[in-house]
Amino acid sequence: MSVREIVEIGHPVLRERSRELTREELRSAEIQGLIDDLIETRRAADGAGLAANQVGVAVRIAVAEIEGVNPRYPYKPPIPLTVIVNPTIEPLDDELFEVNEGCLSVPGLRGDLRRQVAIRLRYLDREGAEHEEIKRGLTAGTFQHEVDHLDGILFVDRADPRTLTTWEQFDRFHRDAFVERITAFAELVGS
Ligand code: ZN
């Protein structure tokens, strides 16, 4: 396992639609090694998730994990390590919520955008088994952010540009109000 370099906004691989993997490719040592490296790279960078194209490989794999309190997003509820391969997302209804996001590939910036409150997430795990799960609230937002990566979309595409802040100015002027609002929302929707 090794920590790979995370590519940043401006790199064309972040703007490609990453391709699906066959089950045979998924079983390969190369792809299993990539998954191990995604897990390790996410942990080293303290992200909530990491998509394969963020380390320069345009295949439809992402990992999400929040162990205890994430230092970048301390208000996010825990997510057990989840490897999603060929994921698809279907909104359960029209309800949206406003969230503030950052991204390991967009260093220094955060911004407000809208996400679906409730989604059905379908994916293969790293062994190729099919999963279908309902995700809500902040956790649903995390998975939408990762699947967006695989479609070449970054959070700044969806954010109101007038809400963009550096992390320092977010902490200074916006964090308290956001955390209060999002904590109340998370209690309401259950995650
Ligand atoms: Zn990201």
Image (cartoon, rainbow, N blue to C red):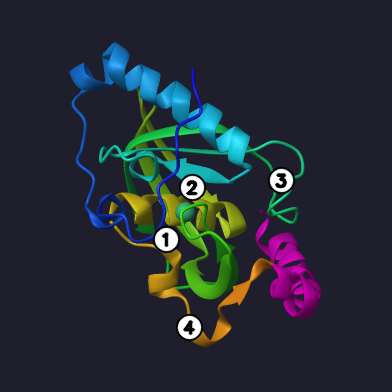
Given the current orientation, which residue lies at the most extreme bottom position? Answer: 162
Is-magenta flag for residue 170?
yes
Figure quadrant of residue 131: top left
For the magenta stretch, what is the residue range?
Answer: 168-191
Name which of mark 4 and mark 1 comes first in the sequence: 1
Disc on the earlier residue, 2 or 4: 2
Q: Residue 136 or 146: which is nearer the viewer?
A: 146
**Residue 176 sits above or below residue 25 on the image:** below
Foreground pick, 52 / 96: 52
x and y percentages locating residue 142 in the rendered image: 52, 53
Q: Residue at x 76, y 44 (%)?
A: 69
Residue 168 location in percent, x, y?
72, 69
Residue in the picture at 43% in, 50% down? 146
| Secondary structure under the numbered disc 3 in the rendered image | loop
Q: Are marks 2 and 1 in contact (CB under 8 Å)?
A: yes
What is the C-alpha distance between the residues marked 1 and 3? 27 Å
Q: Amino acid at mark 3?
A: Asn
Q: Is mark 1 within 8 Å of ligand 1?
A: no
Q: Residues within 10 Å of mark 4 (few under 14, many from 20)?
A: few
Tell me if residue 34 comes above or below residue 20 in the rendering. Answer: above
**Residue name at image x 48 percent, y 68 percent:** 115
Kindly identify which residue carries mark 4: 161
Disc 3 designates what residue? Answer: 70
Circle nearer the viewer, 2 or 3:
3
